[in-house]
């Protein structure tokens, strides 16, 4: 079964760069040299940047209060798209750092979306309330988004699949976090707990949020979450 192992996560981060591009059709957009310079340092925080950003498909999930949340509604903000599970020790290590980075950069344009596609929704909601999670905690509420475990080159990994059974993102282990810029492009990732308290990681976030724009769209929830009609 798909598990959470710090060693396996780092090993899988190498395959992430290979299999992701082979599995999903992406649109490439050039990255500036300033990001690359910070990105080299951010590797010390277990954060890796793509050579070029790429657009990712939309995710439409439910929040713990029942609202429908779409990733595309966060255009104009930097998003840490964080995949986790309740019984993951490494996730518990990273969670306090995500809390702090949200507090630091939330007012400047950062959002954290914590996505759980493996635990029962009631357990996910209880965890969010118990831990007073300061960012949206999301799960599939019947929309057809799922985490599919596959075997590639003799090793197990998993992909988020949409209702059409198309692979959207690879999740080789918990936690896995994608960094999504203000245009909705994935610019980097981390497999295993990232050190969001690291100065280089925070410099990277600061650089990205400097490009953020106010959302201000009709129907937008105060925390940046737009309510969209259920399908």
Image (spheres, grey):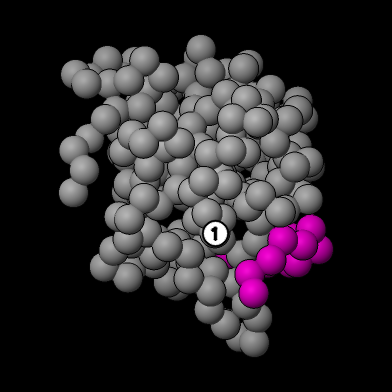
In the image, residue 155 lies at what x, y percent? 65, 81
Q: Is 43 one of the magenta-colored residues?
A: no
- Viewport quadrant of the N terminus: bottom right
Residue 95 seen anywhere in this rendered image of the structure: yes
Q: Depth check: 92 or 213 in front?
A: 92
- 22 sits to left or right of 15: left
- Closest to the observer, 188 or 28: 188
Kindly indicate the quadrant of the structure image that contains residue 182.
top left
- On the image, the x and y values in percent for residue 193 come to 73, 46
Residue displayed at 54% across by 69% down: 158
Instruction: Give the residue at the far bottom of this rendering.
Output: 154
**223, above or below 85, in the image:** above
Q: Residue 88, image x and y in percent?
A: 72, 53
Residue displayed at 56% across by 44% down? 124
Return the residue nearer the eye: 12 or 62. Answer: 62
Residue at mark 1: 118
Is residue 192 found left or right of 139 in the rendered image?
A: right
12 drawn magenta: yes
Is 77 placed left or right of 3 in the picture? left
Q: Residue at x 75, y 66 (%)?
A: 8
Relative placement, left or right, of 79 versus 215 is right
The main secondary structure of the magenta stretch is: helix
Number of numbered discs: 1
Q: Quadrant of residue 225?
A: top left
Give the extent of the magenta segment. Answer: 1-17
Q: Residue at x 22, y 35 (%)?
A: 228
Local SS, label 1: loop
Q: Does 180 sit above or below residue 87?
A: above
Crowding at mark 1 (Cα within 10 Å: few <14, some 14-19, many 20+) = some
């Amino acid at each position: 079964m798909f598990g959470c192992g710090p060693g396996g996560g780092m090993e899988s981060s190498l395959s992430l760069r290979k299999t992701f591009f082979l599995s999903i059709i992406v649109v490439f957009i050039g990255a500036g040299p300033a990001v690359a310079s910070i990105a080299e340092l951010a590797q010390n925080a277990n954060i890796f940047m793509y050579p070029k950003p790429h657009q990712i498909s939309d995710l439409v999930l439910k929040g713990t209060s029942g609202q429908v949340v779409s990733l595309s509604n966060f255009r104009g903000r930097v998003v840490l798209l964080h995949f986790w599970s309740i019984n993951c020790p490494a996730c518990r290590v990273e969670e306090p750092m995500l809390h702090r980075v949200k507090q630091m950069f939330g007012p400047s344009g950062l959002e954290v979306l914590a996505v759980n596609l493996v635990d029962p929704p009631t357990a996910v909601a209880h965890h969010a309330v118990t831990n007073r999670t300061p960012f949206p905690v999301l799960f599939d509420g019947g929309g057809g988004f799922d985490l599919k475990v596959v075997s590639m080159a003799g090793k197990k990994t998993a992909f988020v699949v949409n209702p059409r059974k198309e692979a959207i993102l690879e999740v080789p282990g918990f936690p896995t976090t994608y960094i999504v810029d203000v245009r909705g492009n994935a610019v980097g990732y981390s497999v295993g707990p990232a050190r969001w308290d690291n100065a280089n990681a925070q410099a990277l976030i600061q650089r990205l949020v400097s490009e953020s724009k106010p959302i201000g769209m009709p129907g937008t929830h105060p925390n940046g979450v737009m309510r969209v009609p259920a399908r």
